[in-house]
Each structure stands twice: as C-alpha cells, then as structure tokens.
Amino acid sequence: MKATRLEDCFEDPSRISSEFGHMKMYTGMLSKYYYKRFDYALRQAQLKPSDSVLIIGGGTGVFALTVAPLVNNLQFTDVPRENPPFATAKKLFQHSGINDSAVDFLSADATELPYGKCEFDVVFALDVLEHIPNEDAAISEIGRVTKTDGKAIVSAPIEVGVPLLVRETYRFLDGGRRHTKSLNELVSGVVGSPNIDESGRHRGYDYRETVSKLEDLFNGVWVDYCPVPIAKWLNPTAIITANHTVIDADNSPKDRFHCDRR
C-alpha cells in the first residue's frame, strides 16, 4: 500500500499555506523519497479497521491523510506549533475531502503521553525522536502505550557515515544550511562517531542508539532502510519496527512488557 500523496488531493499542492516550512518536502523534487518513508511504515504496520492507532508528532498531518480512512480510532498528538493548534492538519483534511471523523487531535508531549498502559495496536513516531532532547523518556512512553501484541514503528534519519555527508551536501544546496558546526564535527560523524548535541535539533543524532534503546523495551526490533533497502545503512533513513511479542523456537510467544488486561 502507498501513502496518500498531496498531488492526489490538491490541484496545486505547492500553494498550500502552512506555518510548517517543511511542507515543501511533500511537493518538491525529493518528495518521492519522503513519501517512500510513509510507504515503508504502512507496509510494516499492516493496519486493520479495528486497530487503535497513535501518531506521535503528527506535524503537518500529511501521513494522517492515509491512516485516517483505514482505522476507526486514530489519536493524533503533537506539541502545537500553530495558532490555532493543528491548523495545517485540519486544513488538509478539510480541503482533501478525506474524512477525519476517526481522528482525535490532542496536544501532548511525547515524553508524557496522556494515555493508559497498552492502549494502542500501532504507534507511529516518524521523524520525531531525533527532535526530542529526552529521547529515553519518549521511547519509554512508546513502550508503555503499545499493546503486548502491538507494534511501534519509528523512522529516523541516518546522521552517521556516508549518509551524513549526503545530508549535509543537500542542506547546503537547499539554502546554505548545515547541522554540523565544523569540519572536525562532520568528519567525526562520517567516520561513525558523531558529536551528540542535546538541543533537540538532531545534530549528531545516531539512530543506532535509538535501536538499542528500543531493544531494551521490546522483544523484536528490526530495521529497514529507505529508499534503497539493498544499500543497507548507506540510506538516509532507517525504518525501525519494534514488537513486544516475538515467537520463540517452540512457537510460544514471549512477552517482555506485560499488559494487565483485566
């Protein structure tokens, strides 16, 4: 299944007004790459109408356009950056003609989610964790709200190795910006030892640490690479899928994170 593209819903999506400067990601030259991340996440989710789904850091709402028609319960959370909150996401639903009746918009910090234990079949955190200074707390919350037989799907930038050089070249060409602050910092990241910055702007972010932290909470964690899986870690994005339950050699499930279903 493929994610909904803005060009499928709007005659000229480049004219969509938004306080999110990165809306252009979904209409510009590299939009196919950005949508492919959503395609991978959807493939791993295998959503069913009965699934209870949480999108953490929903931002523009572009990904929610695909998820909303597929399920009966979609929670859309973010720390609002617009006034009124969620203006862009609600505008996209309104003008796309896609029904948002299944969507509950809620202002919430990823490190303190206002949900009970084991509420969701699928939790999405796409390009979110690298922006959160207290990533440990956010991952702990993801583990807490995911059902025993559910899954969490995280997309994360690969900011180490050759992909960092590619990303920094793109950032420079796209507005003369960069995340690394010096040549030494760039070289350290390219050789696999990034200088971690706790500012929340993913300078020096290392997706391998995210994988390790998820493995502490989930039994089954694996990584797909986007957009060219065969190139493995040379890709710019990792799609991480985490399950609480895995099947042991004797075909019996092993639960690391117990949910009290009484």
Image (cartoon, grey):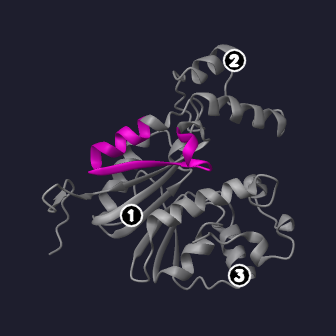
Q: Mark 3, mark 1: which one is toward the viewer?
A: 3
Measured in 3D between alpha carbons, the distance from the residue under mark 3 to the one under mark 1, in whole angstroms, is: 26 Å
Which of disc 2 and disc 3 is earlier in sequence? 3
Is any atom of residue 220 visible in this view?
Answer: yes
Question: Which residue shows up at 59% across the image and 36% down it?
Answer: 234
Name the foreground residue: 78 vs 5.
5
105 sits to left or right of 174: left
Q: Position of residue 246 (x, y in %)?
A: 25, 57
Q: Residues within 10 Å of mark 2 (few under 14, many from 20)?
A: few
Image-based side of 249 in relation to 103, left or right: left
Q: Residue beneath label 2, please?
A: 182
Q: Residue at x 56, y 30 (%)?
A: 160
Label 1: state its secondary structure.
loop
Q: Quadrant of the C terminus?
A: bottom left
User: From the viewer's perspective, is residue 69 above or below residue 182?
Assistant: below
> Does the magenta segment cover residue 214?
yes
**Mark 1 residue type:** Pro
Say the numbered circle drawn on residue 94.
3
Residue wearing tag 1? 114
Part of the protein shown in magenta: 209-232
Depth order, front residue of 89/69:
69
> In which quarter of the view is residue 83 placed?
bottom right
Label 3 amino acid?
Gln
Figure check: 56 above or below 139: below
Residue 65 in the image: state x and y as whole percent: 62, 74
Q: Tag 3: Cα neighbours inside 10 Å, few (<14), some, or many (≥20)?
A: few
Instruction: Give the x, y percent position of residue 145.
Output: 33, 62
